Amino acid sequence: MTGRASTLPMWGAAWLVTAVFMLSNSPTPLYVHWQQELDFSTGTLTVIFALYIAGLLSTLLVAGQLSDRFGRKPMLLPGLLAALTACLLFAGAQSVLALGIARLLTGIAVGVMVSAGMAAVGDLGGSERRRQAALLASVSMVFGAGLGPLLAGGLAQTMAHPILPVFGTDLAVLGSALVVACLLPLHRPVRSSGQPLQLRLPTVPAANRRHLAYGIATFGPGITATSFVLTLGPSLLSRLLDVRSPMIAGGMACAMFLTATGVQFAVRHWPIRSIFLGSTTATVLAMTSLGIAVHASLAPMLVAAALLAGAGQGPGPIGRPHVDRFACSRRTACRGQCGAEHLRIYPGGTAAT
């Protein structure tokens, strides 16, 4: 097998991540359309997005453990089916309830991809391409997150009824991802007999808790800022700044994630302290710019806030501590089959092998 051919499964797994993250942000430029059609408030929109977060966080608690126990593919396929169901609900949404369920399912699908999907990219990359696989997984996530709102904004700008074209395109992309997932050479892990499944909350060794706290303190506000811009940005453009172009809303979201991708490449060799400081500074400036945009009704400041939010969130996958499994007390590579949580944190995202 040639070197080029051997990387195809890794790229295929990355396509799954891109497809689901494309769906996750496709609704962004369309929220104003739904608000007008279904007559709900910005507060209701916040609740709809909160359902996405609830689905994401609840899935993250269990998806990684389940994929370690039963394999990546048994998690990836239900995750893609959840994304396909959400896509159909978005396409035919006639109520706030339908939008809420669609966002909940989207959060579940994204949670599966963040855990099992990105892990599958690393598995298929192999130990010799570990750094390349980590970067590919991160870039595929951000690329999909930016491509979704750009596509939706472009179609909404040129079409009077953009909902079906937008989610019809997403449906085709997710359908191709489902086919790719079925073909990926992912193998089930060897399971020890007689070991019942016990889902546990991850624990962190005391020596690593400081590193984890630094990562959370930096990455948490960054991703919160991007989520805030994604959810309320189009409404702010429309209601406060009187800018109603869905292309601007979608382009703003896309630019935010492209900035995040560019920053990842720019800072990948920086010291961890510098990454944390730069990310925090960009996030603070993003929220400051957002406040100025709202109070002074300046659309350019809202765009600046989006770009700065992307710059603050982008270094997160590089700068946050890397959590990995380590051998059990018997010093055997049990891969978690002894039933205990095996976590070790490496500052800076470089895991020992």
Image (cartoon, rainbow, N blue to C red):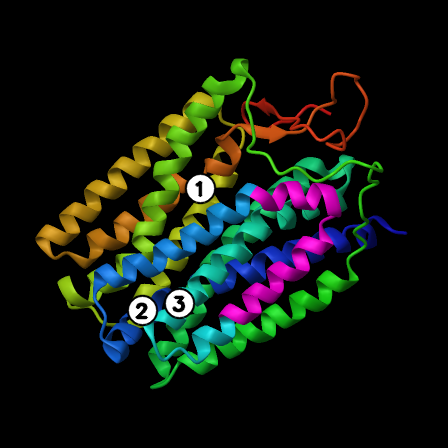
Q: Residue at x 54, y 71 (%)?
A: 85
- Residue 333 place in picture, x, y as percent: 80, 26
Q: Quadrant of the C terminus?
A: top right
Q: Nearer the viewer, residue 174 or 111?
A: 111
- Pick out the residue farthest to the top: 207
- The stretch drawn in magenta includes residue 72: yes
Residue that badge 3 annotates: 27
Amino acid of disc 1: Gly
Q: Is residue 6 left or right of residue 64?
A: right
- Pick out the residue farthest to the right: 1
Q: Nearer the viewer, residue 69 or 109?
A: 69
341 lies above or below 301:
above
- Residue 152 place in picture, x, y as percent: 42, 71
Are the residues tagged 3 and 1 within 8 Å (C-beta)?
no
Number of other residues with Cα within 10 Å of mark 2, as a class: few under 14, some 14 to 19, many 20 or more:
many
- The stretch drawn in magenta includes residue 265: no
Label 2, label 1: how far apart the Cα atoms are: 24 Å
Q: Is residue 45 left or right of residue 142?
A: left
Q: Residue at x 50, y 51 (%)?
A: 142
Residue that badge 1 annotates: 314
Provide the residue span drawn in magenta: 62-86
The local secondary structure at tag 3 comes to loop
Residue that badge 2 annotates: 31
Is any part of residue 17 visible from this angle?
Answer: yes
